[in-house]
Image (tube, coloured by chain):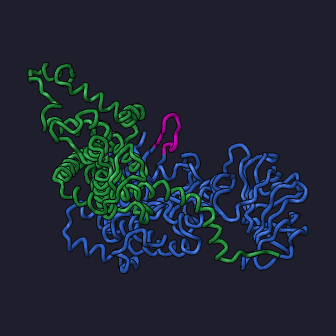
């Protein structure tokens, strides 16, 4: 006799299959976040047993939020993220639009272009540290050819800030490029042909058809880059270590210093919660503008 | 205003492959031309060349007497409706329809008037604020047509516009398209692989195979007088029965396998004994007719379609596939052997070598006799 499973039985079967993945996701994603928040309520330093950690309640949060250095580094982070991510988005989109066609040899060029993304951030930091070196760096050598005096790139507050932005742009513009070129490739070619028949030339086609059609790709790319830019550490660690002064001390650098130099893990965790809140807010904002998880804008 | 379209020796090559070879076609102003053929025959490529979406490899394209071979798509005074609708997904229906006009800086009042008029014609006034994703397939197709109408072009190009719709909606849209053409009176070039669309919509049908025009003619003409074996096999449903035979007299073909002689509706000026291919429309096979020779058919499947029954089986003696279309319900004939008379009106004879129809059209025959 044919058996028709009851609805609740099929729901239970679904849960049975989904549960392992859900548990792993929760463990891998939520647990560290909860731990970080929990740590903010304790006074604890590396090397002491966790059992000896002292409950301090909201004290760490109160101290941290009253600390001008935290807000200064948050401001530095915001500036860094705003400038670098804007430049990366602009350059990535522009390059993708320029290189999207089927021109001979373009596949090789595209592969070459995404290489920086594959380099480890520490290596990127070391490379740019050498390039920006005041005495031996090729950048100063190149400027000398044009008669420009050598500059202390990493010794000057403004130039050092520019240097970390340049290195970030160099490494992460390819990411935007890949995302956008994939987005452009997914556009139904007949829509573009319809626009050509309607009289849209390159600029109109780009501005009014192509970019709106990949808005969801741009949104997710922006979110991913913002999250990364707010967590940037390695390149700045190697390139400037937050200096000169505190000119390049982004929030994650400050968290690092508080945790591992100041040995105040509770305070560092409290600042991490602030960073988490800022990133979550920006992510929410970007997704509100164009949510790639909502029903497909591109869907015909 | 409507304008004629003329293709002069139009050729398209991709690398070493010739997709369209020296097509010559003249569509009069207001005419409805349907380009039909199997997949890969070059019909869509031809339409895309007319639209300016593909560059021609040779020849000229004229619209309204003006050479537009090198003109941009928007300079050709055409509008095109695509198979997958090609609507702008991020724009509302009204924005989709008005997009072309906004690019020409047309006055807002004029844009509103034209969009409103097109929406009224197509019955989509209630959908103007919706996005394409909130529309059904039929509604999207109407919007795509609305976008074309709003531009008030001289020529409409349709690239398999009904292929993505279900059978019922396709039939409904077919009627609407015919009415729309009658109302607007614009020159229309329409690509399809569906012969029903071709037969019902076209003033003239262009049948293509491997980039070469096989025949141009009115629907009745290509059905009743297929120029060659390809057209005979392509036009008509169910497809024409084709049997190898030989001419025994100017008006009789013998089918050696079935050992039967079939009388033709006309005489053929070819020597007796010539190898030919005899074509018989399934509608030309009659059950229970009195006179004439009979084909014996072993019926395998009898498909009752409501007003007719299609018998599928083989010709006794030769084993060749045979299809007959009989009026009424004959479902009981399945798995039986039946005798079918041949109506000479539905017979065609093709040269076994050249594949050309050996029965001359009336006009040509009368020319020969004068």
User: Residue A259 in the image: x percent, y percent?
Assistant: 31, 45
Magenta highlight: main SS:
strand
Q: Which chain is blue?
A: B
Q: Position of residue A262 (x, y in %)?
A: 26, 44
Residue B75 in view, yes or no: no
The residue that appears at 88% across and 54% down in the rendered structure is: B318
Residue name at image x 34 percent, y 36 percent = A121
Q: Say left or right for B329 vs A145.
A: right
Residue B177 spot, x, y in % from top left: 47, 71
Q: Quadrant of the C terminus of chain B?
A: bottom right
- The answer to whether residue B241 of the structure is visible from this angle is yes
The foreground one among B1 and A241 is: A241
Name the image quarter holding the N terminus of chain B: bottom left
- Vertical comparison of A93 with B290: above or below: above
Horizontal and vertical percent for residue A183? Answer: 39, 50
Chain A's colour is green
Report the span colored magenta.
Answer: B11-22
Whether residue B174 appears in magenta in the rendering, the answer is no
């Amino acid at each position: 006799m044919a058996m028709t499973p009851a609805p609740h039985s099929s729901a239970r079967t679904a849960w049975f299959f989904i549960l392992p993945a859900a548990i792993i996701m929760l463990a891998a994603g939520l647990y560290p976040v909860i731990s970080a928040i929990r740590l903010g309520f304790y006074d604890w330093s590396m090397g002491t047993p966790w059992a000896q950690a002292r409950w301090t309640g909201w004290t760490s949060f109160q101290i941290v939020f009253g600390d001008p250095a935290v807000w200064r580094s948050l401001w530095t982070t915001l500036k860094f993220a705003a400038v670098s991510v804007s430049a990366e988005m602009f350059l990535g989109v522009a390059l993708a639009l320029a290189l999207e066609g089927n021109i001979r040899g373009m596949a090789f060029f595209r592969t070459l272009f995404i290489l920086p993304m594959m380099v480890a951030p520490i290596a990127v930091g070391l490379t740019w540290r050498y390039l920006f070196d005041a005495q031996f760096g090729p950048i100063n050598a190149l400027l000398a050819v044009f008669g420009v005096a050598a500059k202390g790139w990493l010794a000057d507050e403004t130039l050092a800030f520019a240097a970390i932005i340049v290195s970030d742009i160099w490494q992460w513009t390819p990411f935007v490029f890949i995302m956008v070129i994939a987005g452009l490739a997914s556009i139904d070619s007949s829509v573009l042909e319809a626009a050509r028949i309607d009289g849209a030339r390159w600029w109109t086609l780009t501005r009014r058809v192509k970019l709106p059609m990949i808005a969801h790709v741009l949104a997710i790319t922006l979110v991913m880059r913002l999250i990364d830019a707010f967590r940037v550490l390695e390149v700045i660690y190697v390139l400037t270590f937050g200096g000169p002064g505190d000119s390049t001390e982004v929030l994650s650098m400050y968290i690092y210093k508080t945790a591992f130099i100041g040995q105040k893990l509770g305070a560092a965790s409290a600042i991490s919660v602030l960073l988490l809140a800022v990133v979550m807010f920006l992510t929410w904002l970007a997704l509100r503008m164009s949510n790639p998880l909502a029903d497909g804008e591109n869907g015909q | 205003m409507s304008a004629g379209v003329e293709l002069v020796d139009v050729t398209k090559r991709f690398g070493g492959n010739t997709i369209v070879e020296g097509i010559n076609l003249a569509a009069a102003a207001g005419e409805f031309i349907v380009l039909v053929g199997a997949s890969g025959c070059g019909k869509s490529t031809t339409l895309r060349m007319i639209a300016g979406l593909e560059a021609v490899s040779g020849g000229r394209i004229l619209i309204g007497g003006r050479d537009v071979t090198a003109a941009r798509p928007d300079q050709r005074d055409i509008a095109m409706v695509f198979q997958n609708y090609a609507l702008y997904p991020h724009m509302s229906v009204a924005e989709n329809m008005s997009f072309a006009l906004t690019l020409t800086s047309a006055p807002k009042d004029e844009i509103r008037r034209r969009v409103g008029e097109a929406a009224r014609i197509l019955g989509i006034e209630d959908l103007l604020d919706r996005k394409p994703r909130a529309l059904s397939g039929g509604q999207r197709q109407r919007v795509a047509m609305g976008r074309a109408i709003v531009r008030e072009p001289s020529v409409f190009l349709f690239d398999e516009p009904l292929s993505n719709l279900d059978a019922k909606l396709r039939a409904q849209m077919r009627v609407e398209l015919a009415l729309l053409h009658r109302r607007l009176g614009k020159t229309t070039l329409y690509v399809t692989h569906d012969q029903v669309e071709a037969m019902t919509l076209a003033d003239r049908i262009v049948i293509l195979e491997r980039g070469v025009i096989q025949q141009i003619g009115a629907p009745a003409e290509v059905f009743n007088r297929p120029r060659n074996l390809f057209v005979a096999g392509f036009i008509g449903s169910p497809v024409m029965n084709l049997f190898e035979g030989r001419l025994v007299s100017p008006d009789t073909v013998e089918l050696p396998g079935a050992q039967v002689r079939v009388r033709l509706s006309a005489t053929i000026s070819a020597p007796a004994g010539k190898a030919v291919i005899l074509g018989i429309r399934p509608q030309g096979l009659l059950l229970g007719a009195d006179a004439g020779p009979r084909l014996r058919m072993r019926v395998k499947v009898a498909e009752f379609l409501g007003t007719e029954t299609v018998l599928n089986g083989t010709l006794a003696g030769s084993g060749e596939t045979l299809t007959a279309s009989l009026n009424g319900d004959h479902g009981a004939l399945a798995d039986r052997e039946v005798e079918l008379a041949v109506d000479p009106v539905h017979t065609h004879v093709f040269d076994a070598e050249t594949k050309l129809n050996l029965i001359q059209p009336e006009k040509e025959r009368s020319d020969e006799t004068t």
